[in-house]
Image (cartoon, rainbow, N blue to C red):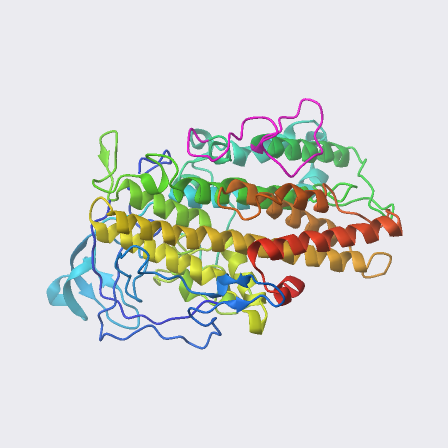
Amino acid sequence: MKHLVVIPLAFVVALCVGCGSDDDNKDTGGGSAVDAAVAADGGSSATDSGSAAADSGSTASDSGSAATDSGAGKPDSGGHGGAPKAPTTYKFTSVSEKGPGCYSGPPTHKCDCAVAEADCKGTWTDTCPCGPSSVSHGGQTARHVLIAEMKTYLTDLTAEIKKDPDTYGKGGVVKDGINFFFLFDASVAGDQPFKLSTTPETMQKTWNDLSAPNLKGKIAGNDAKGQHKEWKTEDTLQGWKLWAAGDLKTPEGLYNKWVGMIDDLAVSHAKGEAPKDPAGKDITKVFVNSAGHDLQQLLQKYLLGAIAFSQGADDYLDDDTDGKGLKCDNTKPYTKGDKTYPYTALEHAWDEGKGYFGSSDDYNDYTDDELAGKSDTKKNYFDTDGDGKIDLKTEYNFGHCLNAAKRDRGSQADSKTDYSKAIFDAFLQGRFIISSAKGALSADAAKDLAAQRDIIVSNWEKAIAATVVHYINDVLADMATIGTDTYSFYDHAKHWGELKGFGLSFQFSRFSPMKDDFVKFHDLVGDAPVLGTASADDQAAYIKALKDARALLGKAYGFADKNVENW
């Protein structure tokens, strides 16, 4: 669980330089996460404001097995290879180079670099963060927004078809609409606004305010190098069997398969030929079919795995390819063309990994309730710097980082997990190791950095797996109501789509403990939910299969039995 902390800050700078990423590098000022901000204002330590965090250093026992639910333990930030341990107050900020400015002190901890010394009402210091950000992951933030906007497009689609059935009755219209996000072309649409909104308003309004990437270039298999499998080879992708002649059985091919299914459904709805649910009623949501596929959920959750988790675990945080991930250069500023950036290749790779995890710069300052949307004070974003706007690159939480907090929140009192804090603490410690090296990492520092990577990737995948367990439990609950007035076909389809979509993610990390049982898991889950039209025997068999699939996850990830049953 997150600690809501109050941290006095005085700003300290480390050498900041990033890896020849093929992402854009326009995000250099007010970017997404940066180097040093170390407390020195009275020397006080961070305080835990009441959140019930898991005991640091301990693990929750997995009753009945030798495994432990190790997400509850805090990362061992020092001692693996002898690298220095980050101060407890070390934070991601939006700063890079120090300079003279007026420091406000608590409670706001802000620096004003424009005010004259004579007009300073706080403390004049030479260590204000007045230079450009040394962290740039605008491309990763933009991809999170693209995935979110694709989901919003599908949410709005049913109403749009009703308004203009003639247009949507033509095949390919919806496919083009979805591909606007997947194939995004900034030269055509960069100045268009996106729909994602916050209160207060977002700092960024148009796509060009964020970055200019697309999703296609980063789905597993479409990177030039660095993937642990040749994803473009047919049948390398596993976990889905409902292919037709001519389908490409690749990560991008599965995306195209599902988009084609939605396009066909849109045409049917536009022509007044909606498919039927198990009760024989017209299905009103255009992205749901009669087999119980909620294609909105399948697409979104799958893309978070095939893009965000794949890129984070198998690219930017991996160390199996020279010049990629943890094997990037840390000795000089990254240059591209005639432009030099305020980060090294290694710093940039590490920060882009954080970008794909989706967390804000002050993720540890959120409680699990806040990240789960159960608080009135914060949502999944907060105007941390008090400028009256939400910076999507630094103050907003996306994707998997939200699910990590939700599963921590839902873990049982005697088997608490803290995947969210373990992940973010390791991101902080890793950044500290890289920046403190001020050049090439020693063998010990490289070993310690890899240890932080292991903490991140392991707990990130555990959070995904715990979320799959959560949706297995939801599907089991849905099936228990089949034939009653409380049964909801749409809930059943939604929960199964989230289960299946998230469950496809494990194959995108070479570190996955599910490698040996991945195919078995998906054979148990199948390629569609079992609905009320199935026989009682078939329903009972599928319930058993889901429980067996859940048990596989519990064993592979060392989940406590109580968590497996109650997430």
Horizontal placement of 177 versus 459: left or right? Answer: right
Residue 204 visible to the viewer:
no
Q: Residue 167's spot in the image, x, y percent? A: 68, 30
Image point 47% across, 32% down: which residue?
Answer: 217
Give 207 or 397, whichever is nearer the viewer. Answer: 397
Image point 43% across, 43% down: which residue?
Answer: 140
User: In the figure, residue 116 lies in which quadrant?
Assistant: bottom left
Image point 67% across, 47% down: which residue?
Answer: 497
Q: Residue 464's spot in the image, x, y percent? A: 56, 52
The residues colored magenta run: 223-251
Q: Residue 537's spot in the image, x, y percent? A: 87, 51
Residue 179 visible to the viewer:
yes
In the rendered picture of this protein, how many numbered marks are placed on residues? Answer: 0
Horizontal placement of 506 versus 337: left or right? Answer: right
Give 133 or 514, whichever is nearer the viewer. Answer: 514
Q: Is residue 231 shown in magenta?
A: yes
Give 321 or 499, whichever is nearer the viewer. Answer: 321
Q: Is residue 153 shown in magenta?
A: no
Give 199 or 421, whichever is nearer the viewer. Answer: 421
User: In the figure, residue 473 lies in which quadrant?
Assistant: bottom right
Horizontal placement of 116 versus 486: left or right? Answer: left
Name of the residue lying farthest toward the left: 118
